Image (tube, rainbow, N blue to C red):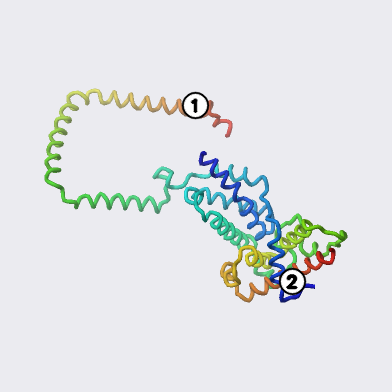
């Protein structure tokens, strides 16, 4: 018969002598499979997939940073550099109007076509070569 | 070693501890496995911080305990109701199937073997513990296995201190009967 006064200690000793239950063998594969399907942490996702709070915070931060830059006094040397760059920009503008604008449309169409072709090729590879189709 | 390998090693290291915490709090292996999976997915989401932390075990245990308590309060609404009943009426588990049978049934089992070895003794005590009704088992497990005080248990469960003491006392009395049976069989 166990004395009621000692019951707590007796039970404590008995319970702590119990072997720790072992996890079933199915747990590890379940966890790994679920982890494979789990989305990456928000900070590893594209900005568009971040939580709304972080999106808003990041926009505010960047806007604050950009706004803060406007109030930073610009050194005179930087002003000189700006003027030089402005002259260079004017030169580039003239060159582009003379040489690049006539072919710009063709370059754009070519770039879009190549992008679409690459996307189609990647999709086909993904589906047939890497086995995405077998998972569906 | 890839991140996947590191996470797998992490799960291997802590899976028994997490599962043991869950199965003793919930009383059922299937539910405990679900909760353990959720615990490790939480760890996976912040594995950069948790994976290398020396407090990983404590963090996992805390998350497992909280998830189990959430589970119990969410899915076993009869917790409060049963806790107000007398132990014999509350002996049946609240809506959970248990392959090992109810505690009352385990008490009624005739002990035919004269020499129960230590493993059998532990197995029966473990079964009796898991067979306790939720409102007795959970505070008992928190007290004896998680080293929580009565006050902490009352705060964690959202019940009064008196109720925690009463439930733990009743749980101990029930386990005492099991121990008496085991001692008599020696």
The residue under the point 68% across, 48% down is A24
Which quadrant of the figure contains the N terminus of chain A?
A: bottom right
User: Mark 1: which secondary structure?
Assistant: helix
- Relative vertical location of residue B157 with respect to residue A135 in this rendering, above or below: below
Q: Nearer the viewer, mark 1 or mark 2?
A: 2
- Relative vertical location of residue B32 with respect to residue B87 in this rendering, above or below: above
Which quadrant of the figure contains the C terminus of chain A?
A: top right
User: Marks 1 and 2: same chain?
Assistant: no
Q: Mark 2 sits on what residue?
A: B173
Mark 1 and mark 2: span between their CA atoms? 67 Å
Residue closer to the observer: A47 or B161 = B161
Residue B107 coordinates in the image, percent (x, y):
80, 65
Quarter where residue A95 is shown = top left
Q: For label 1, count other residues whose C-alpha is less than 10 Å away and answer few (under 14), some (14-19) or many (20+).
A: few
Q: Mark 1 sits on what residue?
A: A125
The residue under the point 52% across, 48% down is B44
Quarter where residue B174 is shown = bottom right
- Relative vertical location of residue B3 with respect to residue A58 in this rendering, above or below: above
* Disc number placed over residue B39 in the picture, else none: none
User: Mark 2: which secondary structure?
Assistant: helix
- Relative vertical location of residue A101 with respect to residue B180 in this rendering, above or below: above
């Amino acid at each position: 018969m166990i004395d009621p006064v000692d019951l707590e200690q007796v039970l404590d000793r008995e319970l702590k002598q119990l072997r720790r239950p072992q996890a079933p063998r199915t747990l590890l594969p379940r966890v790994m499979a679920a982890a494979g399907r789990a989305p990456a942490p928000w900070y590893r996702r594209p900005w568009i997939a971040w939580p709304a709070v972080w999106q808003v915070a990041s926009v505010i931060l960047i806007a604050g940073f950009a706004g803060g830059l406007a109030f930073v006094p610009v050194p005179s040397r930087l002003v000189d550099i700006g003027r030089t760059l402005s002259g260079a920009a004017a030169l580039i503008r003239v060159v582009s109007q003379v040489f690049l604008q006539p072919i710009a449309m063709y370059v754009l169409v070519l770039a879009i076509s190549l992008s679409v072709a690459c996307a189609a090729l990647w999709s086909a590879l993904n589906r047939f070569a890497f086995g995405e189709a077998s998972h569906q | 070693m890839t991140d996947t390998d590191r996470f797998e090693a992490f799960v291997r290291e802590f899976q028994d501890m997490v599962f043991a915490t869950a199965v003793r709090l919930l009383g059922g292996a299937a539910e405990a496995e679900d909760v353990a999976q959720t615990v490790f997915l939480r760890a996976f989401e912040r594995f950069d911080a948790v994976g290398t932390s020396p407090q990983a075990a404590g963090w996992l245990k805390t998350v497992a305990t909280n998830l189990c308590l959430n589970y119990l309060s969410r899915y076993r609404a009869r917790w409060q109701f049963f806790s107000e009943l007398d132990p014999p009426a509350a002996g049946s588990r609240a809506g959970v199937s248990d392959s090992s049978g109810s505690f009352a049934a385990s008490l009624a089992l005739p002990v035919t073997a004269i020499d129960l070895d230590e493993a059998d003794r532990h197995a029966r005590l473990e079964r009796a513990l898991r067979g306790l009704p939720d409102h007795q088992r959970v505070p008992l497990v928190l007290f004896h296995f998680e080293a929580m005080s009565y006050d902490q248990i009352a705060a964690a469960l959202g019940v009064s201190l008196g109720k925690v003491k009463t439930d733990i006392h009743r749980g101990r009395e029930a386990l005492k009967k099991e121990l008496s049976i085991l001692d008599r069989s020696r």
